[in-house]
Amino acid sequence: MLFPTFSTAVMAFAAFTSTVDALPPRPGTTTLSNLAKKMPTNTLPAPTGLELKYVLLGVGTQNYTCLTNNATAAPDTTGATAKLYDLGTRLNSDPLAQWKIPAISGLALSLSAFGTWQLDMYLMAEGYNQWLGNHFFTLKVPTFSLYKTKSTPHPLAMVSKQADQDAPKTACQGTKGEGAVKWLYLVDQSVPELSQGGVNTVYRLETAGGNKPATCQGQKQYFEVPYAAQYWVYGPKA
Ligand SMILES: *[C@@H]1O[C@H](CO)[C@@H](O)[C@H](O)[C@H]1NC(C)=O
Ligand SMILES: *[C@@H]1O[C@H](CO)[C@@H](O)[C@H](O)[C@H]1NC(C)=O
């Protein structure tokens, strides 16, 4: 009987983390100035003049379609959906942040492949378990809604891709070796801005998995590839 053991462990973690959770400040209320210096090295345009507001772990799926009934065609990218967890509050004061950052996405993705409680246990143990909102697409616009934060208006970024780069060769290739999706630089270019709550620029970094297969051979019309990534969210200085 494994189940009682598991639930006891989960309850022990929950009891442990509920006391720890009282300590860190609310997400979005402190500057992430320590963490800003540890942004993963990339070739994307720099966040010049902006302030780091959130560092989020996204765990979910990249969605693709193969609607043309053509086995040699490449799948179309239709969107993504992910839950967004607060990494920034904890990592900002973690002396080991720089060593943890490259490992978190791959670890989260591999744990989520087993089921939600394995991922939840890890998030609780590290203090990353505050679920702040969701990533999804509004029509075709990549959207990050932090509707679970206490700030008003809720931080909302509605952005479009301005630049990308391949994920590093060392990136986690996904639960079935699909490959890691690209790193992205996403900015709200709408006039007036659609974003609100002090955020307008998002970097997708430290990606794990999520890539589409080269062709539609053997794929369903609608399919999903699990992924995890870090979203480094910036906005104008407060
Ligand atoms: C199938 O896709 C390939 C690759 O995009 C293309 O070259 C080919 O013309 C397509 N075939 C049909 C029947 O549309
Ligand atoms: C992606 O797939 C999920 C699960 O089927 C679905 O809920 C979501 O609406 C899809 N999102 C997009 C943008 O296609």
Image (cartoon, grey):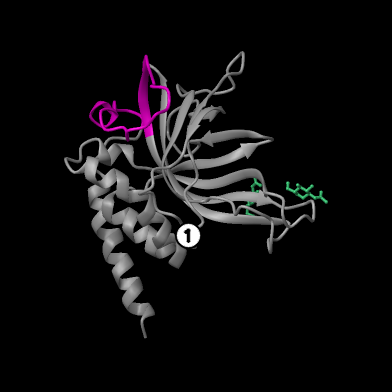
Does mark 1 have its CB less than 8 Å from ligand 2?
A: no
Q: Please state if 62 lies on the left or on the right of 227 as rendered.
A: right
| Residue bounds of the magenta highlight | 28-54
> Relative to the observer, which residue lies in front, 65 or 136?
65
Residue in the image at 68% along x and 61% along y: 219
Q: Is residue 50 magenta?
A: yes
> Relative to the observer, which residue lies in front, 122 or 69?
69
Residue in the image at 72% along x and 53% along y: 66
From the top left corner, tell me how far across and down residue 91 is, in percent: 26, 40
Q: Please state if 91 lies on the left or on the right of 107 as rendered.
A: left
From the top left corner, tell me how far across and down residue 201 is, in percent: 47, 25
> Relative to the observer, which residue lies in front, 173 or 197?
173
Helix, strand or loop under label 1: loop
Q: Is residue 238 visible?
A: no
**Quarter of the rendering containing residue 231:** top left
Q: Is residue 51 positioned above or below 181 on the image? A: above
- State the residue position of label 1: 177
**Quarter of the rendering containing residue 224:** bottom right
